[in-house]
Image (tube, grey):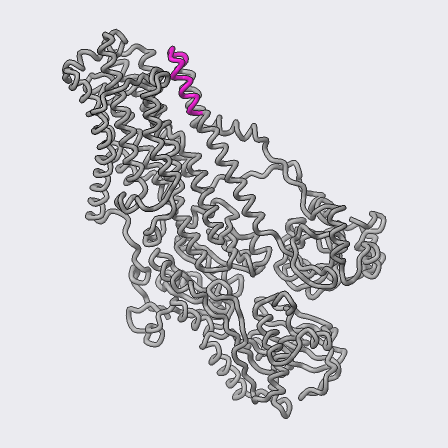
């Protein structure tokens, strides 16, 4: 801040503000701004203090699963098996380090993506208006602020047009307040009011709710009012997403099952197997550790982080991680038309005049150019696409918009808003006489034709103005409808001549008694990729509803062109068809909530036109009342309520306002509807990948438990030791499972209906497949290999049963112990080999594994190769083999081991085939129009 506290900026007359800030009414030069930026620093708050990394690392070591394993390790030491205790603690440490690293990387990814969309502000440098990063602002800069902009620094207003500001960030009061470019009277300047209540100031963090204006920056960064009150010691905390909460519940459930099974194993081994209490304790610890899904939480973090990165590459910037999984359940998309379904490349294609004439044509284009806040410069068009199109049309007609704006300076402005649907300016008119009488001032209004027509009393012809009777009004309406039916956005332009009295006239008086000049037909072509995206939504069971402020006929024409409406259904309205219903805001206002819900339930291709912001919010809430998961697009400040209420808010990154982006969960960097469909595809893949991983780890738990069950039922030695069970977890549950978490979306994921939001991840089909198909086959193969080794050494089942007590109490002869070690090693290797098959099988819950072999996933294939490598190290490296009680076995056993993954894959393929034949598996979605009966509504 350059001003002293003894002369607060709100108390100074505006002409004294400029020298006080060492600036000019035109703003700063680029050189001066760069010097101030270097001296005073960037316009940003100091970084928030975060929870120390050491404490965040300890969080990964002290959560529920980790505490369970720490206790299990301590019990192993108590039981006299320190090597088991160290092994269990190693599992905790490895998973803790990996979880911490994944969370750290995920946060860095989100931070980097957020920096990829810097806030832009409009300011003057060297007398030229342009866009710059908000961080480049310095005291003395001259800003242009419009509706929806977030104020980037503390400013003194120099020009204000109907400015209203939302100060809720600073005061907690959400009602917008008026702000003006005024000099405060001395008595008011001396009042001890909070800075936020000074009517000639705009403070950082507030939002322009309506109107537009210019302001001079006087404080940036930590020197702003917002910076002074910010709690710099508070850390940021990302709340757990619903998916992470659901996974945490799964972890608690499985861990509870593991503890129960461990206690049961302790009791049964003590009562029926003849183990000592310490031996029973060791085995119970092994059962617990085998069933605890150590790698589940880091895999969830990785899956979310990878999806965020992939979506960013597809131009969808995720601001809240919870939105990623919600996208997988989206069943309705309420989309804007302009810029999202269309290219946002407006061009004036046609004009309509009451009586054609070249002079009136030029006057129509000049009026539209004067009533515009866009501009054309050497860098191209800057501003609203509709307004830039009108400037380009004026330029093509031989007019110089900038020169005409200098010739007819603006004296007053009533900005456009979504309720009035028009904009009005008051300019000084110094040209030759108009066809209507002028007295130095001219009011120009442009906007929606029907709204402008209401304010008109006459239309303009070469011979002068003529009164608008009902016949002429119907001609205007018919011309508007004809242009709109061809997909044009139609803008009307009207004039009113007058004198000095117009400068102070109320807005409704200023806009009354006008003379209609004519209509402009602007065409914004649909994006070429949108029709395919609409089709993909239908295949995925997602309903697309167009919500626009445009005229109904224009919206319907675009809906026809993008395939939201089938051409053959529009004219016939035949029975059984489900044509698009074009519902305008005025009609919606007369529909009750019950009627609206019935309409939304039975009509599946809808267009809502001329919608007010509060009606958009009502529409979203009605869909949600029907149980739909709703995604909504928005770009304006008035879209913020609907974006916040929606299950997934999608803001426009190019045309969107700061307010819309702040309210949204995801920002579309290209404003493209097709990007939404891609985001939904990745959202579906996140939940699918977590399900794949859960299936995989549960499948590995079953063969770890089967040896204990066989020991109790068959009275034979345990086919695996506790350390070997841990080795299975370390060899199969970490890197391969992460490969499943990094899988790209399956080809058919957008041919499935949306996933019900309340569907649990740990459901019955998943558990049946994991335990009774994949896991059971692995367990049986493992036990068969264990008994085969005994059989090949001349020991049948009865003899093994007799040797069990001696092996259990370590009294068996060395030769017998050697056979036991070889048998256990073969059983271990068969489980690892079976998991290699399970890894390939779990890549899809619908498609056979061979259809996915050509799909690249380096991390998955690295995990697949790591399994035999880890197993080989444990068996062949003598120190490792001694710790894990492994022994080398004859090469002849490699044949059966190589067949284990084949057996698992065959069993899974047969299971998928049976599911498809019974019609119980995932089915392609049925288009909503065919799935639900259509009910005619009046």
x, y percent for residue 348: 54, 76
Viewport quadrant of the C terminus: bottom left
Residue 522 visible from this viewpoint: yes
**Left or right of 341 in this view: 48:** right
Q: Main secondary structure of the magenta part?
A: helix
Tell me where residue 707 sits by quadrant: top left
User: What residue is rendered at 46% in x and 61% in y?
Assistant: 335
x, y percent for residue 557: 43, 73
Q: Nearer the viewer, residue 936 or 310?
A: 310
Q: Residue furthest front?
A: 891
**Left or right of 584 in this view: 535:** left
In the image, the segment drawn in magenta is 77-92
Q: Residue furthest bottom?
A: 463
Whether residue 86 appears in magenta in the rendering, the answer is yes
User: What residue is rendered at 81% in x and 57% in y?
Assistant: 17
**Left or right of 875 in this view: 798:** left
Tell me where residue 598 sits by quadrant: bottom left
Q: Please, is residue 635 above or below residue 302 in the view?
A: below
x, y percent for residue 285: 35, 19
């Amino acid at each position: 801040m350059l001003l002293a506290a003894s002369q607060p900026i709100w108390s100074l007359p505006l002409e004294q503000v400029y020298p006080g800030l060492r600036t000019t009414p035109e703003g700063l030069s680029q050189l001066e701004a760069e010097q101030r930026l270097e001296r005073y620093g960037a316009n940003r708050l100091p970084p928030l203090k975060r929870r120390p990394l050491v404490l965040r690392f300890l969080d990964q070591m002290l959560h529920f699963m980790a505490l369970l394993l720490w206790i299990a390790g301590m019990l192993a030491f108590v039981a006299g098996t320190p090597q088991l205790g160290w092994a269990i603690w190693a599992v905790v440490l490895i998973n803790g380090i990996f979880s911490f690293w994944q969370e750290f990387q995920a946060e860095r990814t989100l931070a980097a993506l957020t920096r990829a969309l810097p806030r832009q502000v409009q300011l003057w440098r060297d007398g030229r208006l342009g866009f710059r990063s908000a961080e480049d602002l310095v005291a003395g800069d001259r800003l242009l602020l419009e509706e929806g902009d977030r104020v980037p620094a503390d400013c003194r207003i120099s020009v204000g047009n109907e400015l209203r500001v939302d100060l809720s960030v600073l005061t907690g009061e959400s009602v917008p307040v008026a702000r003006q470019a005024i000099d405060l009277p001395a008595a008011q300047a001396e009042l001890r009011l909070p800075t936020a209540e000074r009517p000639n100031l705009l403070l950082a963090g507030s939002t322009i709710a309506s109107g537009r204006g210019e302001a001079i920056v006087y404080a940036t960064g930590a020197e702003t009012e917002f910076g002074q009150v910010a709690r710099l010691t508070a850390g940021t905390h990302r709340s757990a997403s619903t998916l992470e909460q659901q996974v945490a519940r799964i972890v608690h459930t499985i861990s509870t099952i593991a503890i129960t099974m461990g206690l049961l194993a302790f009791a049964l081994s003590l009562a029926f197997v003849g183990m000592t209490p310490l031996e029973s304790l060791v085995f119970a610890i092994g059962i617990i550790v085998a069933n605890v899904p150590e790698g589940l939480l880091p895999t969830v973090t990785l899956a979310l982080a990878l999806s965020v990165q992939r979506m960013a590459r597809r131009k969808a910037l995720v601001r809240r991680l919870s939105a990623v999984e919600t996208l997988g359940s989206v069943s309705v998309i309420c989309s804007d038309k302009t810029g999202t379904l269309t290219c946002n490349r407006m061009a004036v294609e046609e004009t309509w005049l009451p009586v054609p004439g070249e002079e009136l044509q030029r006057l129509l284009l000049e009026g539209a150019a004067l009533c515009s806040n866009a501009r054309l410069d050497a860098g191209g068009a800057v501003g609203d696409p509709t307004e830039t199109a009108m400037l380009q049309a004026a330029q093509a007609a031989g007019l110089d918009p900038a020169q005409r704006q200098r010739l007819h300076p603006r004296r007053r402005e009533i900005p456009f808003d979504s309720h009035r649907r028009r904009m009005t300016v008051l300019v000084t008119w110094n040209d030759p006489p108009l066809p209507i009488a002028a007295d130095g001032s001219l009011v120009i209004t442009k906007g929606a034709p029907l709204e402008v027509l209401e304010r008109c009393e006459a239309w303009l012809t070469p011979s002068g103005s003529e009164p608008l009777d009902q016949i002429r009004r119907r001609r205007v309406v018919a011309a508007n409808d004809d242009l709109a039916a061809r997909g044009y956005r139609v803008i009307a332009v009207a004039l009113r001549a007058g004198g000095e009295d117009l400068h102070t006239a109320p807005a409704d008086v200023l806009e009354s008694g006008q003379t209609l000049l004519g209509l402009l037909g602007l065409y914004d072509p649909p994006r070429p990729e949108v029709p395919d995206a609409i089709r993909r939504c239908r295949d995925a069971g997602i309903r697309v509803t167009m919500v626009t402020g445009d005229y109904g006929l224009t919206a319907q024409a675009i809906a026809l062109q993008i395939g939201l409406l089938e051409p053959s259904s529009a004219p016939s309205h035949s029975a059984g068809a489900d044509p698009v219903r074009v519902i305008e805001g005025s009609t919606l206002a007369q529909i009750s909530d019950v009627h609206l819900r019935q309409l939304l339930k039975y009509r599946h291709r809808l267009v809502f036109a001329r919608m007010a912001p509060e009606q958009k919010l009502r529409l979203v809430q009605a869909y949600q009342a029907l149980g739909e998961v709703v995604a909504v697009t928005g770009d304006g400040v008035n879209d913020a309520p609907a974006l916040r209420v929606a299950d997934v808010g999608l803001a426009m990154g190019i045309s969107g306002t700061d307010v819309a982006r702040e309210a949204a969960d995801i920002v579309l960097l290209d404003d493209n509807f097709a990007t939404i469909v891609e985001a939904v595809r990745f959202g579906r893949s996140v939940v699918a990948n977590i399900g794949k991983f859960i299936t995989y780890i549960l499948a590995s738990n079953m063969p770890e438990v089967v040896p204990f069950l066989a020991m109790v039922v068959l009275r034979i030695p345990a086919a695996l030791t506790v350390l070997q069970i841990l080795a299975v977890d370390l060899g199969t549950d970490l890197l391969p499972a992460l490969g499943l978490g990094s899988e790209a979306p399956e080809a058919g994921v957008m041919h499935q209906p949306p996933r019900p939001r309340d569907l649990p991840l740990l459901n019955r089909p998943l558990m049946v497949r994991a335990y009774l198909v994949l896991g059971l086959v692995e367990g049986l193969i493992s036990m068969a290999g264990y008994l085969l080794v005994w059989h090949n050494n001349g020991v049948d089942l009865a003899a093994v049963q007799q040797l069990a007590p001696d092996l259990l109490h370590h009294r068996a002869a060395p030769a017998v112990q050697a056979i036991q070690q070889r048998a256990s090693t073969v059983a271990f290797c068969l489980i690892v080999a079976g998991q290699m098959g399970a890894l390939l099988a779990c890549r899809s819950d619908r498609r056979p594994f061979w259809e996915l072999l050509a799909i690249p996933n380096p991390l998955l294939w690295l995990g697949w190769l790591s399994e035999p490598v880890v197993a080989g190290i444990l068996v062949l490296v003598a120190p490792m083999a001694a710790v894990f009680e492994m022994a080398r076995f004859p090469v002849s056993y490699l044949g059966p081991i190589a067949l284990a993954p084949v057996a698992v894959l065959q069993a899974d393929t047969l299971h998928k085939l049976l599911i498809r034949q019974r019609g119980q598996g995932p089915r392609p979605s049925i288009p909503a129009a065919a799935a639900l009966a259509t009910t005619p509504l009046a």
